Amino acid sequence: MRKIQVVDIVVFGVVQGVGFRPFIYRTAHRLGYTGWVKNIGSGVEVHLESPRPTDFEDFLHALQHDKPPLSRIERTDVREGELHDCAEFTIQKTSEEGGSFVFISPDISICDNCRREMFDPDDRRYRYPFINCTDCGPRYTIVDALPYDRDKTTMRGFTMCEDCRCEYEDPMDRRYHAQPVACPKCGPRVTLVDAATRAVIPGGVQEAAALIESGKILAVKGLGGFHLVCDPLNAPAVERLRAIKARHTKPLALMARDIAAVERHALVGPDEREQLTSVRRPIVLLRQKGELPGIAPNLNELGFMLPYTPLHYLLLQDLELIVATSSNRKDSPIMKEEEEGIYSLCDAILTHDRPIAMRADDSVMKLSRGRPLFVRRARGYVPYPQAVPAGLEIEGHVLALGGELKDTVSVYRNGYVVTSQFLGDLDEYQNYAYFEETIRHLSSLFEIKPEAVVTDLHPDFHATRYAQRLGLPHLQVQHHFAHVLAVLLEHGVPPGTKVLGIAWDGFGYGRDGTAWGAEFLAADHSGFERFGHFRYVGLPGGDLAARQPWRMALSYLTDVYGEDLPRVKALERVGPDKIKGVREMIRQRLNTPPASSCGRLFDAVSFLAGLAPLQVEYEAEAPMRLEAVADPGCGESYPFTLAREEKQRERPLQPPYVVSFAETIRGIVADVCGSVPARLISARFHNTLAEVMAAAALRAREELALDTVVLSGGVFLNRTLLEKAESRLEELGFRVLRPVLYSPNDESISVGQIAFALNHLRKGMIRREITRSCRCGS
Ligand SMILES: [Zn+2]
Ligand SMILES: [Zn+2]
């Protein structure tokens, strides 16, 4: 930059409510510049004056490298300014402009400075569980509306004392405009309450720790809701907690005092350590080391997180490790208020009087080749904005409502998508209420006035019906196409780039009305062709087939062997009457809808290998058990066929490729009957699926001249499969993209729906009649 005396800088991104203005103030003072800083619409404006011409390089460098930890700069505009002869540098009051799009920070764990103060007996906030500063603490879960000021947060009921106000108003203080600032004199308080009598138990946090140690189950109020907490080494306590939650085998999350405590029970690599200790504090799935029975039965991974609120740190001073699982009954959202039924779930409650504005579960991830693979994206990541690829921006706002299971909602404004936290299964009444609550919250926070709403193609989804009532233009997107679009959006793939989208999961409503589940889509932003899919196999009993893996085993065996079924040991557990009944259903095609589901193929194989239970308790339990035993040293695979569909439908185009696993199933049956260990059967099956992807990708390259493959759908939470597929495809020279910022499961559907809407709205393809909806995707 040439040397000038005055510069105007506008910084866009997450720069409000994160200590950005005081940082600018301190930096300008330090470097000897005068001028001002103020919040404007979607960012921060800085006016800098120098006594002599300069390139302001020192300031711009500090802006990039010393910025506050919670801030994220999306864009910086720098131009020469007009001289105002400022005598000093000041922080100006926020101008009340309407129509702005202000980003807000997610909730962030307590920072080192605050932690040091909290454990300093001479500090006025010694052992105060609500200590925070501009660099740390609650954000998204305490904000009702923007701009981010104290009266728009759940701290509005607490009047700052003299000392807190001084810190809050001093630009040189690290609590300058920290909205949740508080101290023992003026802020929220913790209470320990007996769940049965509702009487206060004296002793607070220390007594709570003692109760946990003695085998009690406690509810502890965190950032986005209550955790249920117990001692993981106390088997009867863990069992009782499982009974309360009606969760007998689903893994329970653990919170450990520090990394050393984690390392006693699990293997922690450098990438895992980085995530565990990051300010977002996700639950990280780690390979189990030694015994911790009852926490993740039949699996080889444990989910760990480190403390993230001051209260957690105080509690874990006296305990090394706790179970910390979301306080909810089966299939309901995490509880955020006592009145939601928390008393019936525990022996005592460690609660406080700072209300939670928005619930949010803990985020859960694994690491794959050094990058996050989200199982659940929520606290710590929401509501970070995601920029859409250049060429996709539009003027208006869009609301996307996602799918049905593992739902999220997304909003679009000014070139950015903001996606909600994981909301759960909308078929549950309480989750549906949570869905509505979240739409209201996001819409009010970001002042969203949607010009269109997007949903799945499925006519019976709750979100689809919700959308129909909004009276807005309504777009509908095929489920697996949305999976692929979400990845294109996240990776900034420009419109017009053709990819092979491999979207594999349990179920998505197909364009032809059938149940799709393992799809190869030749796609770009504007549409897709169904390039291939798994052969359709009946789901005997419909939804029941997803809960009882033996039904899928029987369905696959019948598909391959017809009437003459081989004797497979695993089926002996089922009993002859049930087998007879289900075979009859399959034969007569009674309540046995055909599907190309990948999840159900995994169920069948897991059951044949003797790993799946008769009835699963949670989604993907059978596939997870299969993955858990896979032998990493085995390179063999089973045969399969990939061929064009024989029956020509009434379509002018080539029929899609169909993958048949008949030979695979024969191979597995031979292995099972030959007492080949499950670890080898599992590995061979995983390798087979990687080969299936490779074969399809090669055909696609040959026929469609594309070289990018997108992997998405819940199946790709299987790290073994994901990594095998990535390396195999890369070996063949493909560029492979997969979700990194979002989960490959249905949480990313709403993101893909936004991408679809932007493309259509840009092209003016939307029909503005309210009654007619656009059911396309092609
Ligand atoms: Zn702090
Ligand atoms: Zn105070």
Image: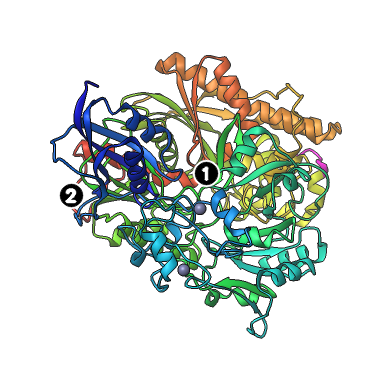
Nearest the eye: 465 or 264:
264
Nearest the eye: 428 or 334:
334
Where does residue 143 sit, x and y in percent of width and height?
Answer: 39, 61
Pointer 2 residue: 768
Q: How is the image coloured?
A: rainbow
Query: Does ligand 1 reach within 8 Å of label 1's beta carbon?
Result: no
Q: Where 133 falls versus 561 (above or below)?
A: below
Q: Is residue 567 magenta?
A: yes
Q: Earlier in the sequence, mark 2 or mark 1?
A: 1
Q: Where 603 falls versus 472 (above or below)?
A: above
Q: Residue at x 21, y 46 (%)?
A: 396
The C terminus is located in which quarter? top left
Start-end of magenta stretch = 563-569
Outermost residue, right direction? 675
Where does residue 545 sit, x and y in percent of width and height?
Answer: 62, 51
The N terminus is located in which quarter? top left
CA separation in Å, label 2 and label 1 = 32 Å
Where does residue 60 sit, x and y in percent of width and height?
Answer: 33, 31
**In the image, is 92 to the left or to the right of 315?**
left
Q: How many marks?
A: 2
Query: Does ligand 1 reach within 8 Å of label 2's beta carbon?
Result: no
Q: Amino acid at mark 1?
A: Asn
| Chief SS of the magenta region | loop
Q: Secondary structure at mark 1?
A: loop
Q: Which mark is residue 745?
A: 1
